[in-house]
Amino acid sequence: MDNCIFCKIVRKEILSNKIYEDEEIIAFNDIHPAAPVHFLIIPKQHIETLYDIQDDQQSLLGKMMLLAPKLAKEQGCQDGFRVVINTGRVGGQEVFHLHIHVIGGRERLSPMVHSG
Ligand code: 5GP
Ligand code: ZN
């Protein structure tokens, strides 16, 4: 996808603070961190949202999810963290390339959001 900001990060056309990469997935720090640890795990393949995941991408999604605790620990989250996948308009998704937010730090995170 030519104009997708995360595809540009995958193609290294935009710099990112990368913390993990393999043939299918990259993870990099969020440019506007919501907590001391805040990184994103994304598939290299352009998949717009969680709605668009296909049955044959089950292992890709599982691999992304399994990376969350491993990378969270590496990034200093020894005592918990949060994963968030904002999906679509109501979910507040801003970048339409599937990504898992991993958020943590030393202190307990604030409670989950409430709808307005
Ligand atoms: P969403 O609201 O779609 O779930 O979250 C998109 C996230 O991507 C936001 O937390 C935002 O700060 C992050 N983001 C947007 N553009 C860039 C970028 O160019 N580089 C990095 N590292 N993060 C970005
Ligand atoms: Zn993309």
Image (cartoon, helix red, strand yellow):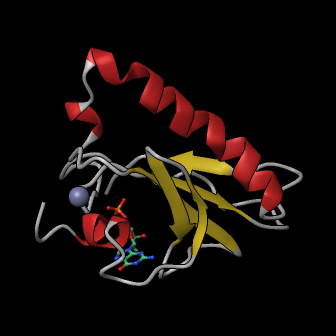
**Quadrant for the N terminus in the image:** bottom left
Q: Quadrant of residue 92?
A: bottom left
Tell me where residue 67 appears, x and y as whole percent.
64, 42
Q: Residue at x 72, y 43 (%)?
A: 69
Q: Does residue 71 appear left or right of residue 100 in this picture?
A: right
Tell me where residue 35 appears, x and y as whole percent.
65, 73
Q: Quadrant of ligand 2?
A: bottom left
Tell me where residue 24 appears, x and y as whole percent.
43, 44
Q: How many marks?
A: 0
- Residue most extreme to the left: 2
Tell me where residue 41 appears, x and y as whole percent.
50, 53
- Residue most extreme to the top: 55
In the image shown, does 112 or 3 lie closer to the viewer? 3
Residue 37, compared with residue 31, is above or below; it is above
Q: Quadrant of residue 68?
A: top right
**Quadrant for the C terminus in the image:** bottom left
Residue 13, compared with residue 111, is above or below; it is below
Q: Residue at x 34, y 82 (%)?
A: 14
Residue 99, compared with residue 67, is above or below; it is below
Q: Residue at x 35, y 72 (%)?
A: 9
- Residue most extreme to the right: 78
Q: Does residue 97 appear left or right of residue 43 in this picture?
A: left
Q: Does residue 15 appear left or right of residue 34 in this picture?
A: left
